[in-house]
Amino acid sequence: MEDRFGHRISYLRVSITDRCNERCAYCMPRELQEWLPREDILTYEETLRLVRVAAELGVTKIRVTGGEPLVRRDVINFIQEIPKISGITSLGISTNGTLLAQDVGGQTMAAALRAAGVQSINISLDTLDRHLYSQITGRDLHAKVIEGIDAARAAGFDQIKLNTVLMRGRNEDQLIPLVDFAAERNLILRFIELMPVSTTEVLSEENFLPVAEAKRAIEKQFGNLIPEQGFRTNGPATYYQIPGRDQRIGFIGAMTNLHFCESCNKLRLTCDGKLRPCLGSYLEFDIMKPLRAGANDDELRQFFLDVVERKPEQHDFRESYQPNRKMIAIGG
Ligand SMILES: C[S@@+](CC[C@H](N)C(=O)[O-])C[C@H]1O[C@@H](n2cnc3c(N)ncnc32)[C@H](O)[C@@H]1O
Ligand code: SF4
């Protein structure tokens, strides 16, 4: 699949739930919305069928996300089917980490994910301060995340990344401690700019901290970062080495990096069966409808191709605010 701008679409992010055991200030409004009714969520069988169709069209990489994907029942049984799909060579998951150390049938959730074929895992962690963590996420689960990170390390994933959303006045003083934390555990740390994808009041200009500023603060401490042109992870981050250390860190400047969309190879499938060609635009197309109306694989393939045809050249976050659709439903 190729869009009108020559992007080859090889990466599908699959959100399997809108539910979450946390309430991050930038993701979910505190006064909780209703969860989607179960019948409005794609079943695992439906999701796997769409992944199969996408794989036939050249998608090789899947990332499972949410909401919090690990709160959905039987998630391991679902995930272990993905690597069996012909053409899928890379499987990752994004999680808040709170459930990774949980026991599932005599092993940790992290070990079960690894055994199910997950190669890379992204864990969200905005602070090392327990109190601040509770403030940001609405839950006192910081210790669980640290345990979860350790469980992931013990499980032997090819790659573990930590994702930190930058918030001025909240976690500015956490940047250096997080860099050190990641170094000690041999994890790739990435700093992400706040994106206007939710309805919460946190997404104001005063709370926005550009990646360039975070980078300057880190350079003040460690010296000039060394760009790593060659290192790509299929994602929109730019990576650097910290001088004098064998440590890689990344920056995801969704708002301030004007080249952000140039290498976009992504499509998103929401848990309620919408295909989104771009995280940062209103466009989404309901594939659940034809799927449940009995479309055959050819028709579903054509649906994907039509969506890719309408993929915009770049996101329009910078021009328009999108208050209607929550990150939790889209899948980050
Ligand atoms: C929506 S979450 C889903 C997976 C999982 N629950 C987690 O927290 O990692 C995916 C990623 O989106 C990020 N995110 C959520 N809302 C955001 C926002 N408004 N701006 C930037 N990143 C956001 C989260 O920090 C997380 O790293
Ligand atoms: S960012 Fe992840 S953990 Fe936080 S509320 Fe959203 S889905 Fe849940």
Image (cartoon, helix red, strand yellow):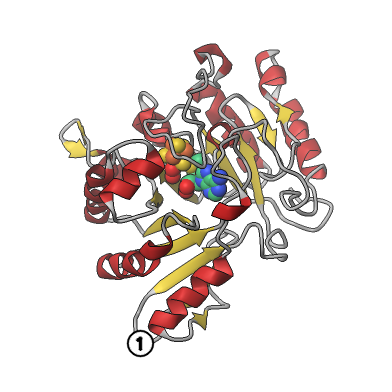
Disc 1 crowd, CA 10 A, few/some/many (<14, 14-19, 20+): few
Could you tell me which secondary element the residue under label 1 belongs to?
loop
Tell whether 128 sits left or right of 107: right
In the rendered image, the vertical position of residue 198 relative to residue 49, given as above or below: below
Query: Residue type at mark 1?
Result: Gly
Tell whether 278 sits left or right of 43: right
Labels in figure, total: 1
In the rendered image, the vertical position of residue 110 relative to residue 39, given as above or below: below
Residue ID at (15%, 34%): 106
Asked if residue 292 shows in the view, the reply is: yes
Q: Which residue lies furthest to the left in this view?
A: 106
Location of residue 145 in the rendering, given as x and y in whole percent from the top left corner: 28, 46
In the rendered image, the vertical position of residue 190 relative to residue 25, given as above or below: below
Location of residue 174 in the rendering, given as x and y in whole percent from the top left corner: 36, 62
Tell whether 127 sits left or right of 146: right
Residue ID at (50%, 14%): 38
Q: Which of 214 and 149 is in front in this view?
A: 214
Asked if residue 82 shows in the view, the reply is: no
Location of residue 239 in the rendering, given as x and y in whole percent from the top left corner: 51, 71
Q: Which of 299 and 175 is in front in this view?
A: 175
Quarter of the picture holding the C terminus: top right
Residue ID at (28%, 54%): 129
In the rendered image, the vertical position of residue 76 relative to residue 223, given as above or below: above
- Respond yes or no on whether mark 1 lies under 8 Å from ligand 1: no
Residue ID at (72%, 65%): 258
Location of residue 123 in the rendering, given as x and y in whole percent from the top left corner: 38, 50
- Residue 309 placement: quadrant: top right
Q: Nearer the viewer, residue 256 or 182?
A: 256
Residue hosting label 1: 244
